[in-house]
Amino acid sequence: MGYSPEQLEELGKHLDERPEQPDGEKNSVRLAFDLLKIRDRDGRESPLRANPVQAEFERMRGKRNIIVKARQMGITTWVAGRFFLKTITAPGMLTVQVAQTREAAEGIFRMVQRFWECLDPDLRKGLLKRSRANIGQMVFPELDSEFRVLSAADANAGRGLTVQHLHLSEVSRWPGDAAATLAGLRAALVPGGELVMESTPNGAHGCFYEEWRQAEENGMVKHFFPWWMEAAYVAAPAKDLSEEERELKDRHKLTAEQIGFRRTLEANYRGLRVQEFAEDAELCFRTTGDCCFDMDSLDQRLREVKGPAEVRGSGRLHIFLPPQPAREYIVAVDPAGGGSQGDYAAVQVIDRESGAQCAELRQRLRPKELTAEAVKLAREYSASPGEPALLVVERNNHGHAVIALLENAVPYERVYANKDVAGWLTSAVSKPAMIAGLDALLADKPELFRSKRLLEECRTFVNHANGSMGAAHGTHDDCVMAFAIAQAVRRELLGSGRKA
C-alpha cells in the first residue's frame, strides 16, 4: 500500500493508537507491515510482520522500557522499525540507537537502510529524500529529522544531542564504563521521550543487571521474553521427560518439540543455556565469578521465596516476620558512607532462637541517619522495655561513627561487644568463616533466607583473583554482610550460652 506525505504525517500523530478494527492492531503494527521490509530467517525480503514477542512488547510497552530476552527474538529489529516510523512521520525528531560494538551498530544501520530503500520511490525522492546517509546517520531535511546508530565503544556516544527516541541494545555487553555511557545517553533524552533498553543476560553484575533490579523504583516497565516465545525454536520431539522437563512443559504449556529444542541447547551451551536462552527473569543472570555460595541452592530458594509481609519506606524496609512477645532478636548493621551513588547500608533482624530472617533494611544512609533507623528497628523488635534486642554494628570503617553515636547522640541500652570492645570486627580471618557458615546454613535451612534481595546478593558474592571475597564488580553485598554478622553472633551466643 502506498502512502502520501499527508497520510504519513497524519498517521504519525496517531502511531501509538489502536483504531477500531477487527484485529485490534495499533497503527504502528499496521504501518510497519505496510511500509517496512526485512530479511527473514531464510534470507528472503519480507514485510515486517510483528511476531509474538514483538506484538507482546507493543501491547505492554511504556515510555521507559527494559527488556530481558533470549537470543534472536527480534526485539532490535522491531524497535529499529518502530523508531524509524517515528522519525519519518513527524518533524524535528532525533532517534538514536546504540549497539554494543561498531560491527553491531553497522548491522543495525544496514537494516535501517533497507527500511528506507524499500519505501515508495515518490517518498524517497520527496518528503524522505536524504541529505546525508553515511554509515550510522540518515538526515531528512524536509522533516528536519534524523536517525543515528552509534556504538557504545564510543564513551561520548550521545553527548550534546537532544534525543526523542533512544534504543540501547545489548547493554550487558557494553565495553568500558557502561554506567557512565548510559548516564550520558539518558541525559540526552528529552522529558517525555521514549527509551528502550534491552539485552540478553551476561552475569549477575554490571550496569544492565543493576538497571533490571531497580527498574520498578526507577519507573521503568519490565519485559521478559523467554526462548519459547520464538516459534522457530523447536526440534525433534523429546521422549522420556525428566521431572524438571515435565514441570516446565506443564507450567508453560510447551510442546514435546520445544522440550527437544531445549535439550539441544543443553548439549550445545551447557551451563550458559540459562543465560543465552532465558527461562526465568531472575535465574538467567548467572554470576561469572567463582560464587561463594552453592548456585543450585540459591536458585532453588529464589524460586520459593515470596514477597515480604509488609513493605515500608518506599521499598527500603521489608518485614518478613513481625516481632513476637517473649522472643529475642538480633539486629545486625553493616554501615556505609551514604550518598546517592555510594554503597548501601543494611540492617538485618533475625530471630535469636531459630535464626529466621525477620526484617531487612537496605538504604543509602549516612552514619547518623543509619544509627537512628537501626535503633528504631531494634526497639520495635525488643521483647519488652526491659529486654531490648541485641544491636550488633560492624565496627570496620564507618561503623566507628555509628558506635560513637550509640554511645552519645542516639543512646541504646544493649550493644554487642567483644572483649569489652563495642562492635563486630570483620577481618581477613573472620570473614571466610562468616561466609562459610552462611553457605552451610543455606544448604541446611534455606527457609531461614526470606529476602530476594539477600539471595540475589549471594549470587554475586564471589572469590576474587587476589584471594579476597565480596561483591562482583558493579554489585553490592551489604545485605549479605549484615545477615552473615547476625548469624555469626547468633552462633557465638548459642555456643557460649551468654546473653549478649
Image: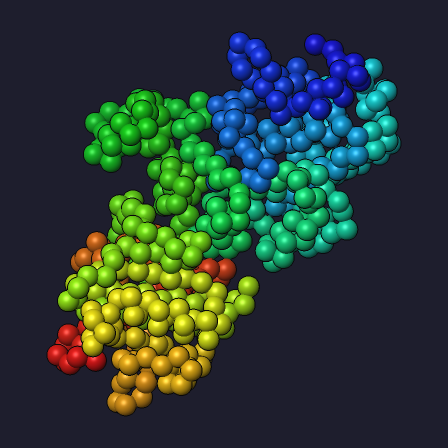
- Up the image or down, 298 lies above or below 7; here it is below
Is residue 429 positioned above or below 107 on the image?
A: below
Left or right: residue 349 compared with residue 327: right
Toward the viewer: 269 or 29? 29
Farthest residue to the bottom: give it.
420
- Place of residue 380 in the rendered image (x, y in percent of width and height, measured from the top left): 29, 66
Instruction: Give 110 or 394, whichever is nearer the viewer.
Output: 394
Which of the 4 quarters of the picture holds residue 162?
top right
| Residue at left offset 82%, top offset 29% | 143
231 or 414: which is nearer to us?
Answer: 414
Position of residue 368 measured from the top left corner of the image (x, y, whole percent) = 46, 75
Looking at the image, residue 463 lies above or below residue 66: below
Note whether 241 is above or below 281 in the view shown.
above
Is residue 431 visible to us here? yes
Residue placed most toward the observer, 417 or 115: 417
x and y percentages locating residue 342 in the rendered image: 52, 66
- Residue at 76%, 21% in the rendered image: 9
